[in-house]
Amino acid sequence: MLLKMFKDKGSLGKAAAEQAASAIRRAIAERGQARIVAASAASQREFLDALTQAEGIDWRKVEAFHLDEYIGLPVTHPGSFRKMLNEQLVSRTGITKFHALDGDAPDPSAVVRRVGKELASAPIDIAFLGVGENGHIAFNDPPADFETDEPYLIVNLDEACRRQQVGEAWFANISQVPVRAISMSARQILKAREILAAVPDSRKAQAVKLCFEGPVSPMAPSSILRTHPNATIYLDTNSASLLNRALLDVLKEKSQVTVSA
């Protein structure tokens, strides 16, 4: 796993978008299409804004999969991840193959099966992730299921995850936040050829510390990214503020950390 650190989330977003755009262009050149997984959250705005402005991408050849979505939330709700992805990525690029997770469908398990079958039909070229304040990737809250091979899961959201959504002002109070969601599984995320996680802001600092320090554990879901051979984590000075300096020095010696001014 490679760690890249930047002074602010603006420069982080631009650099992450450059890597993402290169991966998409390369997949199209080599295989005629690119299959991506896209995350949506407040932390992804700068990254997605820069990515949608990248030049030289034929977005008609990009097939996008939805990372996670609340169950029971209409697409018109400000907190809907489908709404965010449509506004921040799909409508801005002209992607025509977008496999959205319909969280307010009558039978969420049918959505899990249908989109999961499409997802598992061929490898993912690059997956875009965030990391939650409780360390989750997608909606895999601690203790995360590291064992299932199912592409998508129906999960229960823990209180820390739900409070984060209130803190980001998507919901007025915790009683409005759904208690269940559809989430891509951790093992499915790891099947991507490349993983890119954009993780800015001081509120993510404790989660980042758990991601890099200590054992790989379901109690720190994002720590499993350390097992992927081609994962890059983008941090700013705020999200990296609690990392052990000695650890960073060791990673620098192994060329696993780059720091940009």
Image (spheres, rainbow, N blue to C red):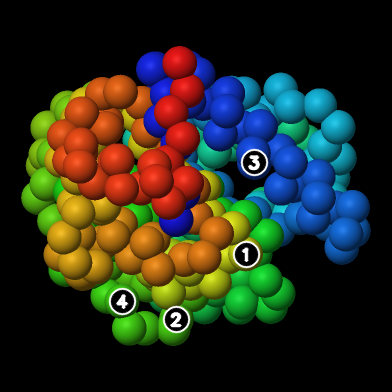
Which residue position is annotated with label 2?
150
**Residue 17 point in image, percent of width and height:** 61, 32
Question: Which image quarter holds the C terminus?
Answer: top left
The residue closer to the viewer here, 258 or 75, is: 258
The residue closer to the viewer here, 188 or 100, is: 188
Q: Is the Cβ of the residue at disc 4 closer than 8 Å to that at disc 2? A: no
Instruction: Tell me which numbered mark, 1 or 2, is placed earlier along the sequence.
Output: 2
**Residue 35 point in image, percent of width and height:** 70, 58
- How far is disc 4 from disc 2 in space, using C-alphas? 11 Å
Q: Residues within 10 Å of mark 3 (few under 14, many from 20)?
A: many
Circle 1: element type? loop
Residue 24 appears in the figure: yes
Question: Measured along the vertical axis of the image, is residue 193 above or below residue 18?
Answer: below
Which residue position is annotated with label 3?
20
Left or right of 165 on screen, residue 235:
right
Instruction: Tell me which amino acid carries mark 2.
Output: Glu
Q: Is the Cβ of the residue at disc 2 closer than 8 Å to that at disc 3? A: no
Q: Residue at x 54, y 72 (%)?
A: 191
Which residue position is annotated with label 1?
193
Circle 3: element type? helix
Instruction: Tell me which numbered mark, 2 or 3, is placed earlier along the sequence.
Output: 3
Q: Give the number of the disc on residue 180.
A: none
- How far is disc 3 from disc 1 in space, using C-alphas? 12 Å
Q: Residue at x 39, y 42 (%)?
A: 252
**Residue 225 point in image, percent of width and height:** 39, 60
Question: Which image quarter holds the N terminus?
Answer: bottom left
Which residue position is annotated with label 4?
146
Q: Is the Cβ of the residue at disc 3 closer than 8 Å to that at disc 1? A: no
**Residue 68 point in image, percent of width and height:** 42, 55
- How far is disc 4 from disc 1 in space, using C-alphas? 18 Å
